[in-house]
Amino acid sequence: MAVKSQTILVVGGGIAGITTAVEAAETGYDVVLLEKEPSLGGRVTKLNRYFPKLCHPTCGLEINYQRIKKNPRIKVMTLCEVESVSGAKGDFTVSVKRSPRFVNANCTACGKCADATSVEIPNAFNYGLDKIKGAYLPHEHAFPMRYVIAPEAIAADGAAIKAACAYDAVDLGDQGETFNLNVGAIVWATGWRPYDASKLSMYGYAMADVITNVEMERLASHDGPTHGQILRPSNGEAPKKIALIQCAGSRDLNHLPYCSRICCLGSLKHAAYVREQYADAEVDIYYIDIRAHDKLESFYVRLKNDPQVHFVKSKPAAIQADDNGNPVVCGEDTISREVYARPYDLVVLATGMEPSSACGKASIEIELDAYGFMVPKAGEVDGQISAGVASGPLDVSMSVQSATAAALKAIQAVSSNA
């Protein structure tokens, strides 16, 4: 089929989608970048630090945001999801649904709208660990830097919110919209979601002091619910004994049968967070085996040599509550054969990555593997390409590499001699 459109659509505004968009646009192609959340950044922007240098996500993200701002070929559209795809390489018609933001481009992020409402909602950026006002900035590093108003706040305080805005930025009548895009190639960079820890009934996620690895990242972050202090959710006290449970639901035929690649190193990083904050804290890491790939082996060795970090080769059978409601990790040590029941102040479950793909919609026909990840080789044929964790579990650096490859494939799909 002849190429009728050379525009490249990138679905997903995480690190992979952003990288694909800027690299394709900087070679001279028009790019539309869709993101279903109110701002870009995806899971990376919710991290406290990331490998290999343990720097804050704002480092790499801010550079890319500047590249987006300076490139007129990139059009960013937030709160947008793909509803359907028809056509073929070089001439796709994509139906897109935009959800209402109730705030237009006049917004200066002054925050007066938040002052005008008493409605509070769970803070999605912090995985519901705290609450925020119903008129809110997604987070301090949001791009675009524009507020969002929840429907609950519109219903309760809409008139007051509009009156408080001096810039005519509040649009109470925003109903969202559905529209079509004509594009030549589609890059799916739809990322991942943490495995639902509530499905791990044996691990007591309902207990206040049993949290997940992504929640631990927010506790350690300066803009998290505890302003960077790792504290017990139950009572706000500093934990002195912490358990990190590897492969919580991963490499398990009843849950995620595969390894998510990032979990071992994530737990090592969490142990380092704890040791930085609390000189007297003890950390136990329960593992099947440690997978610290490439140059990151040295990070594992550093933690291995810490006398207050203990590695226990065991997959715990259960986490139960003692008489005071504290979590108790129960199981058998694979090496010593000791049967243990150890109490902790805080338990962190290293849950794995599931693909959060828009491809699950019946109207979008894309080849997936047995685990729901998009099959990479399909994109080389039909103009639909996967990038980042949409294709399989990857860390940040690997996701960026994948995105560069996806940008090249998309350019090949829409080039005039395709």
Image (cartoon, rainbow, N blue to C red):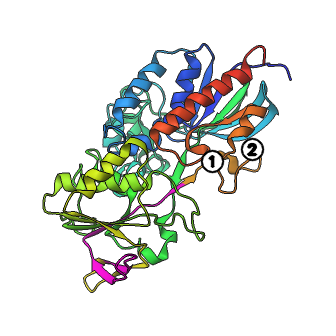
Where is mark 1, residue-wise?
357
Marks 2/1 in contact by CB < 8 Å: the verdict is: yes
Residue 334 lies in the magenta stretch: yes
Of the 4 image quadrants, the one containing the N terminus is top right
Where is mark 2, residue-wise?
366
- In the displayed structure, 283 sits above or below 266; it is below
The image shows residue 4 at horizontal and vertical percentages of 79, 18
- Type of amino acid under label 2: Ile
Quarter of the view holding residue 282: bottom left
The furthest residue to the right = 1
Depth check, front residue: 287 or 399:
287
Depth check, front residue: 39 or 339:
339
Name the residue rendered at 77%, 46% in the picture. 363
Residue 78 lies in the magenta stretch: no
Quarter of the view holding residue 79: top right
- In the displayed structure, 260 sits above or below 64; it is below
The image shows residue 87 at horizontal and vertical percentages of 82, 32
- Type of amino acid under label 1: Ser
The image shows residue 24 at horizontal and vertical percentages of 59, 21
The furthest residue to the left = 280
- In the displayed structure, 346 sits above or below 319; it is above
The answer to whether residue 72 is left or right of residue 265 is right
Q: Which residues are magenta?
A: 328-353
